[in-house]
Image (cartoon, rainbow, N blue to C red):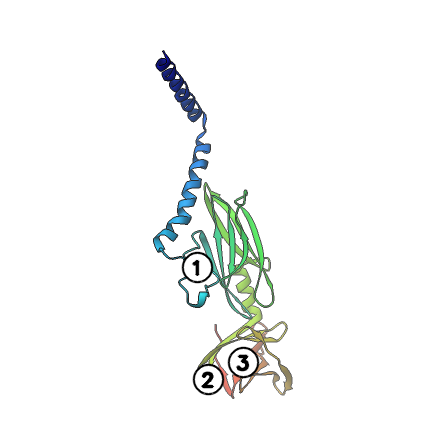
């Protein structure tokens, strides 16, 4: 008799388990299943390495690792007066995670975002130029990422910048230098540093003098005589003309 009661009790418990399992929605099941998978994703690389010590000498790890950037979706190179900056963006389309890197340095990190579309704004370069990454849904689970600089698309910004700046690349004493002239302000930048300059009027125009190490440099500005071309700027280093980057 007691044996039959135990069997009946087990059957009742088993039926209750089946009832609960059938009432679990597919979404709940996927949610509970995802947690062990996330844990495995974190644990398995560590188990595979078999070593907790960093792989970099003197424990100096880089600011980020491409191996860790599993959700990297976009990379842009932005040429500003102080240099060319690399912008990288991670977007987790399941968790909503957003991470922005500028020249390898993490600027923004948001781990959990309910809204998968939107924008992230940050600054780039020594002049703190405003940059915005727009996240737009294309179709289904596909997304489009666009970069704006100072409120303009990257393409339009670079087109506008090419009209207001001149850029030269040269080598002095076995070292590469990138010189940029901002024509609207006449500011001169060299390898990310704003140079101290001295302006001088000459017979056929103006000269903006500065130095790179022990080398005398100046940018000469003369009129082209044509309205469309405007002023022509030429970089002279040690009495040698440097070709401009087109």
Identify the element where label 2 is drawn: loop
The residue beneath circle 2 is 173
The answer to whether the residue labelled 3 contacts the one labelled 2, judged by CB atoms less than 8 Å apart, is no
Q: Mark 1 or mark 3, which is nearer the start of the sequence? A: 1
Neighbourhood count class around disc 1 (C-alpha, 10 Å): few under 14, some 14–19, many 20 upward: few
Q: Is residue 192 left or right of residue 59?
A: right
- Depth-wise, is mark 3 or mark 1 nearer the camera? 1
Who is closer to the viewer here, 145 or 18? 18
The answer to whether the residue labelled 3 contacts the one labelled 1, judged by CB atoms less than 8 Å apart, is no
Who is closer to the viewer here, 84 or 14? 14
Q: Mark 1 or mark 2, which is nearer the start of the sequence? A: 1
User: Which residue occupies 52% across, 48% down?
Assistant: 111
In three-dimensional space, the C-alpha distance between marks 3 and 1, rounded to whole angstroms, equals: 41 Å
Residue 235 sits above or below residue 16 on the image: below
User: Which residue occupies 56% across, 64% down?
Assistant: 160
Who is closer to the viewer here, 17 or 216? 17
Q: Position of residue 94 (x, y in %)?
A: 47, 43
- Depth-wise, is mark 2 or mark 1 nearer the camera? 1
The residue beneath circle 1 is 65
- The mark found on residue 234 in the picture is 3
Q: Position of residue 153 (x, y in %)?
A: 54, 57
- Depth-wise, is mark 3 or mark 2 nearer the camera? 2
The answer to whether the residue labelled 2 contacts the one labelled 1, judged by CB atoms less than 8 Å apart, is no
Q: Position of residue 147 (x, y in %)?
A: 53, 56
């Amino acid at each position: 008799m007691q044996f039959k009661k135990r069997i009946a009790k087990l059957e009742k418990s088993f039926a209750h388990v089946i009832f609960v399992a059938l009432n679990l929605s597919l979404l709940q099941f996927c949610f509970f299943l995802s947690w062990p998978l996330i844990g495995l994703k974190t644990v398995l690389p560590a188990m595979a390495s078999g070593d907790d010590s960093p792989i970099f000498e003197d424990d100096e790890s880089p600011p980020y690792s491409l191996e860790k950037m599993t959700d990297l979706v976009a990379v842009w190179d932005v040429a500003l007066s102080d240099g060319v900056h690399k912008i990288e963006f991670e977007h987790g389309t399941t968790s909503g995670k957003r991470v922005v890197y500028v020249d390898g340095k993490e600027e923004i990190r948001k781990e959990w975002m309910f809204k998968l579309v939107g924008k992230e704004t940050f600054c780039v370069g020594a002049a703190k130029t405003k940059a915005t990454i727009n996240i737009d849904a294309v179709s289904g689970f596909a997304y489009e990422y666009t970069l704006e600089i100072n409120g303009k698309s990257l393409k339009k910004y670079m087109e506008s910048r090419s009209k207001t700046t001149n850029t030269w690349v040269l080598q002095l004493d076995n070292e590469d230098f990138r010189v940029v002239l901002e024509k609207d302000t006449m500011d001169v930048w060299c390898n990310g540093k704003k140079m101290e300059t001295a302006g001088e009027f000459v017979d056929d125009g103006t000269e903006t003098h500065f130095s790179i190490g022990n080398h005398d440099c100046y940018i000469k500005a003369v009129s082209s005589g044509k309205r469309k071309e405007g002023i022509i700027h030429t970089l002279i280093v040690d009495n040698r003309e440097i070709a401009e980057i087109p």
